[in-house]
Amino acid sequence: MPAADPAVKNAKNNASSRLPDLKPVEKIALFRQMLIIRRFEEKAKQAFTQGKIKGFCHLYNGQEAVAVGTISVLNEDDAVITAYRDHAHALTRGSDPNACMAELFGRITGCSRGKGGSMHFFDAKRHFYGGHGIVGGQIPLGTGLAFAQKYLGTSRVTLAYMGDGAINQGSVHEAMNLAALWKLPVVYIIENNEYSMGTSQARSSAGDPLTKRAGAFDMAAIQANGMDIDDVRAKTFEAVSLARTESLPTLMEIRTYRYFGHSMSDPGKYRSKEEIEARRRNDPIELYKARLIEQKVATEESLNAIDEEALAIAQASYDFADQSADPEIETVFEDIFAPEDQIAEFRPSPHG
Amino acid sequence: MPTLTYREALNQALSEEMERDERVMLMGEEVAEYDGAYKVSEGLLKKFGPKRIIDTPISETGFSGLAVGAAMYGLRPIVEFMTWSFSLVAYDQIVNNAAQVRYMSGGQFSVPIVFRGSSGGGLQVGATHSHTPENWYANVPALTVITPAFPDDAKGLLKSAIRSNNPVCFLENEKLYGYKDDVPEGEYLTEIGKARVRREGSDFTIVSNSGSTHRALNAAAKLAEEGINAEVIDLRTIKPLDFDTIAASVSRTNRLLIVEENKPFAGWGAQVAYQVQRELFDDLDAPVHRVTSLDVPQPYNGRLEQAVLPNEDRIIAAVRELLA
């Protein structure tokens, strides 16, 4: 990993309190959540291959410790927003795996009623603001969520995720400038899986590490090892504390790796099988499993039983999605406009 | 009834709605300490303070997207573009985020936001600063597009737009900011989606919007001296289109001229012409005629620009063809 950026110390200096130690049951919950994502994604891959999932489908395998580790230090009413590789964030936020798989199948029971698809999961009840398809386009939105959290006098914070490819979009830099200028409680998280689609970081981004981009805005920056959930948690806790107590933004770069292609349509010619195999040996779930056994938090058997449970959840979500109905044609005209309550409705029926 | 400029009417609408609802805030370039590049927000910083009247950096993508996120969270932001020509830098945030989030989320999130600012040509500011982008936004299903032509409508429609729970593009006209007319005081709401007959007549109908409504009315006044009586409909809202008002007039006058400042290809007038031929074919005594800007980038030179814009001469020439 590259040397830490000088801005890193800003974050460390401002951390207000220590990350509380996890109870054994909480550690096992993190392990379970990562496995649910892994098995869910594998099931989605299978369904895509069977032609049950259409369009684009971006899988999260290899990156599980990022979503689970970061979201584990949030409060339930904090906000989360991400790009199109969004299944894990929704699941970790507490979205029903059945509703998530149904969305991939385009069913009416899906988390976006079959209108969003893989790239556009949403869950208002769990403060999950999507699931956005344009690289970097969600970062101004996440900044706006934090703006509203501050405007309304809450002590909530926003986690705004992006891939490493997004860091070269103007929208990201414009948003970071505003967040630093206006002191907004937002944590920007680059999930750096080393490839923006098929283009490696070396071929797309000048300057390493990517946290250097925060320096121009005098913004705190911090890096984490995305294969180690404990490191992800510790670093995210510092950034979240800074946002919650000082209302200051942080740019996090979490180094991770995705095992499958950019999307299911990616033949993956830009990297070798050997590279992928080597990276798989540093798997975040296996690493955490070994740690839990070493710490005598759990036995191998009990953790394997959790895997059985995760497989069953994934299968159940598949069955639920497969048995759910397609949306009725009439629903194509629904959800375009919010009902008016301060002025008269003024739109003719879209059927017209 | 007090007489106000178009600018003062907009200012009054902003002020009244901000007093009414704490969640309403205004952000944009130079809206606060400078009092607005066109003085629409004059005095608002003093009245509401920097928490709610917010100067932004020159960063349209950033602050437009930020405002969309804030709207998803429950605020009711008003975003000022110094001119709508600059909205192109924020097009992704308006089209892909403001306009799609509700649908893509299956109705879970709303975006109560107003994007507003000046637009239009005629001030010799060249090709990058003279756009009339109402067509570009009206093509996006979930966007409402409003283009007021008179001070009373500017006030009444802006108040309605701020109270809407959906994204609204509110395109003011730079040349109209100083136009004076009667404006009702206090609670005055104009219904969105309703056109207004600004001049009654029986010989033919003109449908126009924004600055072109004034061009149409001026041409109509000249034609009246010859005994030709035009009915002039000001659309006010581009989308949703008030076709009923157009149809009621055209089925009586049997002739239609469309006057719009947009470039001609796929302008809103093309949509009106389509609907009229589709639904009122038997009522027409002549083909629908249309005067638009010429299909060229906006030139700087004043003589050239006047030739590009729809002007009274071209309107009158079109009327003679229409009545021939």
Image: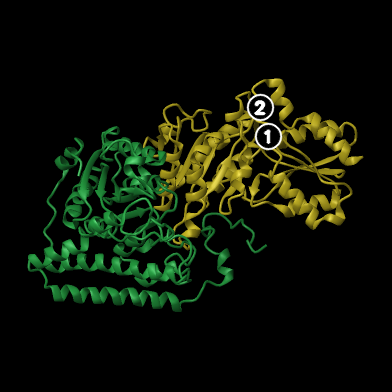
Chain colours: A green, B yellow
Chain to which the residue tagged by mark 2 belongs: B
A269 to A303, vertically: above or below: above
Q: How many marks?
A: 2
Quarter of the rendering occupied by the C terminus of chain A: bottom right
Q: Residue furthest right?
A: B324
- Contact between marks 1 and 2 (CB within 8 A): the answer is yes
Chain to which the residue tagged by mark 1 belongs: B
Q: Secondary structure at mark 2?
A: loop
**A4 or B24: which is nearer to us?**
A4
Horizontal side of A125 relative to B18 (left or right) equals left
Q: Is residue A74 visible?
A: no
**B171 or A290: which is nearer to us?**
A290
The residue to which callout 2 is attached is B122
Residue type at mark 1 is Gly
Q: Where residue B260 sits in the image (x, y, percent)?
A: 71, 38
| Residue in view at x 33 percent, y 50 percent | A160
A314 to B276, vertically: above or below: below
Q: Quadrant of residue B291?
A: top right
- Crowd tier of the residue under label 2, counting other residues whose Cα lies within 10 Å: few below 14, some 14–19, many 20 or above: some
| Separation (CA) of disc 1 from disc 2 | 10 Å
Q: Where residue A227 sits in the image (x, y, percent)?
A: 21, 55
Q: Earlier in the sequence, mark 1 or mark 2?
A: 2
Residue type at mark 2 is Gly
The residue to which callout 1 is attached is B211
